[in-house]
Image: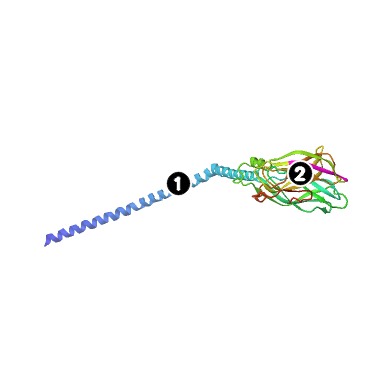
Amino acid sequence: MGDQNTGGTSAELQHIEKEYKREVAITEARPLLHKIFFILWVVFDVALVGLLILVTVGYLISGQWKDRASTAGLVQNLSSIHSAAESQSASSIFVGETVVIGSGDGYDFYVELENSNEDWYASFDYAFEFGSEKTSQHHGFILPGESRVFVALNEEFEGGASGAEMIVSDIEWQRVDAHSVDDYSQWYADHIDFQIVDSEHGTVKVGSENIVRSSFTIKNNTPYSYWSAPFVLILERNGTPVGVNQISIAGFETGETREIDINWFDNTPSSGDLVIQPAIDYLDDDVYMQESVEAQVDVRDIEID
């Protein structure tokens, strides 16, 4: 009995002694652990502050220049886009000087317009204005690359009509559809292929009167037939217009030839050079015939709208 109690007591004492030594070791090591933790914390803070300083200085030295370069590049790109948009938009139509020609009891107004755009065409309303007076309003159009004459005929006013100017309103720009018209230059050349021959201008006797008359033969060499093919006639002397007129050839079929006689007013000069310009809106599908119709010619005072 005595030996067993002695063994148990010895084991308990050894256990107590181990616990005591462990707690003493922990107590003695705690200040060192606190010191190590503090050193690591300081090192971490210093590293964090250093990284912040490095990033800030790096941005100030190089980053802001990169931002400025990016901003400059953006501005340049926007400028390029703007320039490209401007280059693809329509330029203004050039309007020449209005010419006023006495015409019987009234006046004829004449002006030349030029559209320098290669793929933009315009439709608009126009009239001629001088002082407090204004002619009747007409509808016009001009195709890409076209340079042609616009007129207002036999407008009656009291007094003169000097200083007249063309007034354009309700202008609408449209772009040629590249899917429908692949090569506009060739397309346009095919459409304006009208052949004028045997052009004459002078005085002829009709009954007891002498009448100023223009005569010419026109052939439709285009592959198209037109319900109504309008043409403007300009009578020139030494390059200066002295008379204007217009006709509309109804049912003008491809390959057809017409002989045209045009009578002018009494005060039209009996000599001069005749210039004939088609005034057909080739981009309007409604101008093209599907069937042949009986041909006829409508002359003077047929308004082209």
The amino acid type, in three-letter code, at marker 1 is Ala
Residue 66, horizontal then vertical, whole percent: 55, 43
Give how far across and how far down residue 161 sits, in percent: 85, 49
Q: Which mark is residue 47?
A: 1
Q: Residue at x 38, y 49 (%)?
A: 36
Looking at this view, name the residue that lies furthest to the front.
207
Instruction: Determine if the magenta segment contains residue 33.
Output: no
* 160 sits to left or right of 10: right
Q: Amino acid at mark 2?
A: Ile
Image quarter of residue 192: top right
Residue range corresponding to the magenta coloring:
208-217
Tag 1 secondary structure: helix
What is the chief secondary structure element of the magenta stretch?
strand
Q: Is residue 243 visible?
A: yes
The residue lying toward the viewer, choosing from 118 and 24, is 118
Residue at image location 76% in from the left, 45% down from the top = 232
Q: Residues within 10 Å of mark 1 (few under 14, many from 20)?
A: few
Q: Residues within 10 Å of mark 2 (few under 14, many from 20)?
A: some
In front of the other: 163 or 285: 285
Q: What element does badge 2 sit on?
A: strand
What residue appears at the point 15 percent right and 61 percent down from the top-left corner?
A: 5
Residue at numbered disc 2: 260
The image shows residue 281 at horizontal and vertical percentages of 69, 48
How far across and how far down the image is residue 275, in percent? 77, 40
Q: Nearer the viewer, residue 235 or 36?
A: 235
- Position of residue 151 in the picture relative to residue 83 (left or right): right
Residue at mark 1 to residue at mark 2: CA–CA distance: 99 Å
The answer to which of marks 1 and 2 sits earlier in the sequence is: 1
